[in-house]
Amino acid sequence: MYTPPVFKQDRAASLKFAEERGFGTMCAFDGKKPVASPLPFYLTYAADGTPQASFHLARHNPLLRLADGAASWLLAVNGPDAYVSPDWYVSPDQVPTWLYQSVHLSGLVRLLTDEELSVQIDTLSDKFESWLLPKKPWTSGKMTACRLETMKKAIVGLMMTVEEVEGSFKLNQHKSDADYAAIANVLGAGDAAAKQISHLMRQARPQAFAEQVFARDTNMLEGSAP
């Protein structure tokens, strides 16, 4: 991943982002072309602290032919993104760009045993069902044993031993406070992804908005003066 230092995230922040997102695109190379599949996953850690990304694929997914444990795969995990028009800046001579969050995890992949797959299915569903609380979580125990076994035979569990972690959160960190705040304000009135980017920008650099808050409060006081 091309990551200018100003956008680079440390290992802990990148792993935290990937775990919270829990969905990405797994990529491998078959010798002639890239092969990729979007999929949910969760992270665990080995005894020595090495991250492990656990996921499964449909049995007929072409990625499975590449799971030989010898070639490195890449898991691309993306967050919200938003287009930025040059017209929205305070400063002149700007160019169009995109703001985004992205983390790449890469490493060797191995197949899971049937027992490990059973644990993975329950762990994966527990992770995402917890997002729906106070809904009573779905569990594999709600399925008949025969149906569950049939579904398990249709998938193959895998685990990536994460050897490299790369994170880039491009949020206009290199811009002036005035330009930074101007873009965040416009994005705050945009679609859901733009609103998320705006929120992240405000969290990351609240001082950029301090002057706006001061001006607003001053205007309110002046307006209420007798």
Image (cartoon, rainbow, N blue to C red):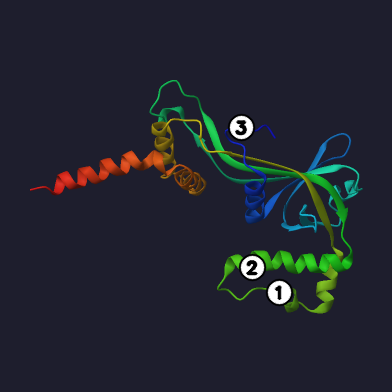
Q: Quick one: SS at disc 3?
A: loop
Instruction: Specify the quadrant of the image occupied by residue 119.
Output: bottom right
Q: Which sits earlier in the primary sequence, circle 1 or circle 2?
A: 2
Q: Which residue is mark 2?
A: 129
Dot 3, how many residues are within 10 Å of its Cα: few (below 14), some (14-19), or many (20+)?
few
Q: Residue 100 placed where, x, y %? A: 57, 40
- In the rendered structure, the answer to whether residue 61 lies left or right of residue 90 reads right
Q: Residue 8 placed where, x, y %? A: 62, 37
Residue at horizontal 91%, vertical 44%?
70
Q: Is residue 78 above or below residue 124?
A: above
Q: Which residue is mark 3?
A: 5
Q: Residue 150 placed where, x, y %? A: 85, 70
Q: Which sits earlier in the primary sequence, circle 2 or circle 3?
A: 3
Mark 2 vs mark 3, CA separation in Å: 36 Å
Dot 2, how many residues are within 10 Å of its Cα: few (below 14), some (14-19), or many (20+)?
some
The reply to whether dot 1 and dot 2 touch (C-beta < 8 Å) is: yes
Which dot marks residue 139?
Answer: 1
Instruction: Specify the quadrant of the image occupied by residue 52.
Output: bottom right
Q: Which sits earlier in the primary sequence, circle 3 or circle 1?
A: 3
